[in-house]
Image (cartoon, helix red, strand yellow):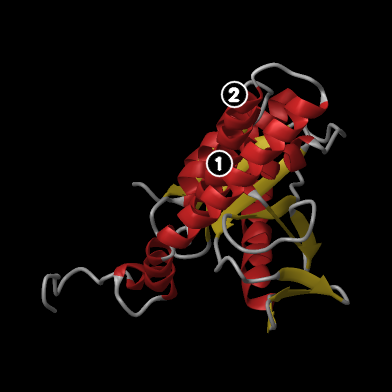
Amino acid sequence: MPGGSIYVQQDEKFTGSSPQWYYEKFWREDARNRQRSRIVKAVAGFVAGIALALRFEVALAPLCGLVLAGVVAGADWWLDWRSFRATAVWRGRRRGEVITRRLLRRALGRQGYHVLDGRAIRDQASIDHLVIGPGGVWIVDNESWSPDTEIATYAGRLFFGERYGTKVAKPLVDTAEAFAELLTRETGIPVRITPLLAVHCGSLPRGGAVAAEGVTLLKPRLVAREIKSSRETVLSDEQVELLARTAARELQSQRS
């Protein structure tokens, strides 16, 4: 393959045939339209600023108009930038597990929780994060879909657009059960693991979370909050430490 390696498979996200490539292409081509729209909004803000200054008899009405125009233009730029950045994981420009790891450690690290990253049962299931704390045990995986993919539930079933979500949910539920079985067997502590899926790109319902088929899908910034919402203490400090040590010993690190 020209410009590539016969030993390293190319990621289709960076080729000219992928939805990600076209998304970036159209985003760049639409820059001029966004700039024109921003100018129109800034002018409207300028006029509104002058009108408000005159209405409330504020001195230096033109300056008030310029300030409001700047605020409107800045806010419009920030919203555009934020919407584009929200697709970074889907476009392959950022790694979802790195983002979620930072969020988990920042929110849970000093509250008695252990966060183990990149864990697997040899030749079986693997996940991005294993969280063990007073409220229980969770596995957290990371996924992303195109920005227009609607993630919803109907009659207890999970959907991604018009497609059933069972192929996404079931492997994560099976992985949680496999991890729980291993930890229970090795520690003698009855363990139930709750599977969570951090969604880095895709359209979630209002509130940023949805649950179905045994899995809760939510925005990455809500994962730690979901974990901490379990206020019931089901594991003692000694049990948390034992489970964390056992997981570190028995579960293979994917970085090894």
Three-letter code for the amino acid on which mark 2 is drawn: Leu
Residue 83: x, y in percent? 56, 53
Q: Quadrant of residue 243?
A: top right
Say which quadrant the N terminus sits in.
bottom left
Residue under pointer 1: 73
Q: Is residue 23 left or right of residue 50?
A: left
Q: Is residue 87 among what the camera can see?
A: no
Three-letter code for the amino acid on which mark 1 is drawn: Ala
Q: Is residue 217 above or below residue 69?
A: below
Q: Is residue 133 left or right of residue 83?
A: right
Please report the residue visible at 47 percent of the width from the left and 62 percent of the height from the top.
Answer: 33
Nearer to me, 175 or 162: 162
Q: Is residue 146 above or below residue 132?
A: below
Residue under pointer 2: 63
Q: How many marks?
A: 2
Q: Earlier in the sequence, mark 2 or mark 1?
A: 2
Q: Quadrant of residue 106?
A: top right
Residue 180: x, y in percent? 67, 53
